[in-house]
Amino acid sequence: MTREAQRRAAEFLAGVPVPMLAVDQRARVIGANPAAAALFGTDLADRPFVTVIRHPAVVAALDWAIRPDLHPAPLPDPTLPPPAEGVALLRAQILADGRDIAAEITVAALPAALGRGATVAVLDISVAEEAEQMRRDFVANVSHELKTPLTAMMGFIETLRGPARDDVKARGRFLDIMEAEASRMNRLVSDLLSLSRVQSEERRRPSADVDLPLLLRGVLATLSPAISAAGVTVETGGLEGSQSLPGDADQLVQVFQNLIENALKYGGGGGYLGVRLHRIAYEPMLRGPAWAVEIADRGEGIDEMHLPRLTERFYRVDTHRSRAQGGTGLGLAIVKHIVNRHRGRLKIDSQRGAGSRFTVILPKTTTRA
């Protein structure tokens, strides 16, 4: 291909927003737009196409686009809309940017003015597929979480209408269980609504100010009956005085109530609850000064393998125990999204047998967008 043709091919590719390669009749790369260079690297010129995308179906589609008289047309993918005449559209898992990505790939002949060859456009759909998989998992988890108590309640109702109709003792026991299951479903629905509300606001940073030490003192006062019932010793630090920072008071109360309740439920056996507030002169990830709130216990702790997934929706270290404690599996997911909305960080440190420490780090100022 002449230099003039290569120049025209480069101009043609530059106007395409998705990654696109142009190859000549020898199936060697003659052009790539900036998006393709970002995805496959900058050293693409004159490389055999097969060294860029090593996928048999894509290579076969390219051969057909270059010489349709010598190669059969690719079979249409039933999961995709029918392509235009002379165009091949397929889905493939390819290696790009050092990772496997799911991609929709469009292969077509070069415009006649640019000579014999083909163009290959690559649309990365990994994020969309991951989001769809998350949606499916979320629906499946919610369905499971609701179906279990509903099935139990339906069974008890059937029993109360039949064999236990006149059994006063059984009726009282079954009604207690049904009340507990209904309460658990109510908590689940409440947490789902809360999670939805938090996610809808996550991109909008709070504009009001909150007094963080005062807020933490209020949370501890509210939870004092639960703290007394758990029989733990509370040690606080840095909660005196006043310190204002940007935040949503209701959401931050939800964060610290959740973390303290978790410490009581799962770490209360250690007999200790620590709530400390301290200033960080410079937090590198927040690019400025910050305040850190630590919620610590001396309970059983959490195995290190579980730590990266603790804030996933419905992820539980011990499913049976969590449900027995009344957990919905959404609390830490809600905490994560609220902290994200405040442009802060959530750190989790724990070891089996050594307790757990959850640290919420909040920026002191609104300078970070």
Image (cartoon, rainbow, N blue to C red):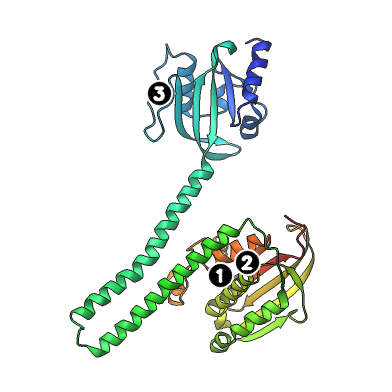
Local crowd at mark 3 within 10 Å, few (<14), some, or many (≥20)? some
First in sequence, mark 3 or 2: give its number: 3
Furthest toward the front, the residue is: 208
Q: Which amino acid type is marked by label 2?
A: Ile
Distance between the alpha carbons at the discs numbered 3 and 2: 51 Å
Query: How far from the left and from the top, in percent, is residue 292?
Result: 72, 70
Left or right side of 145 for 343: right
Furthest toward the left, the residue is: 163
Whether residue 99 is situated above or below residue 236 in the rendered picture:
above
Q: Looking at this view, is 75 or 162 the one in front? A: 162
Which residue bears the numbered disc 1? 302
Depth check, mark 3 against mark 2: the one in front is: 3
Q: Quadrant of the N terminus?
A: top right
Whether residue 97 is situated above or below residue 334 in the rendered picture:
above
Q: Looking at this view, is 94 or 323 the one in front? A: 323
First in sequence, mark 2 or 1: give its number: 1
Q: Which amino acid type is marked by label 1?
A: Ile
Q: Secondary structure at mark 1?
A: loop
Which residue bears the numbered disc 2? 348
Q: Is residue 310 visible?
A: no
Q: Quadrant of residue 22?
A: top right
Q: Which amino acid type is marked by label 3?
A: Pro
Q: Secondary structure at mark 2?
A: strand
* Numbered mark located on residue 74 in the image: 3
Distance between the alpha carbons at the discs numbered 2 and 1: 10 Å
Q: Are the residues flagged by discs 2 and 1 in contact, CB closer than 8 Å?
A: yes
Q: Residue at x 66, y 30 (%)?
A: 34
Query: How far from the left and from the top, in percent, is residue 294?
Result: 68, 73
Whether residue 159 is situated above or below residue 344 in the rendered picture:
below
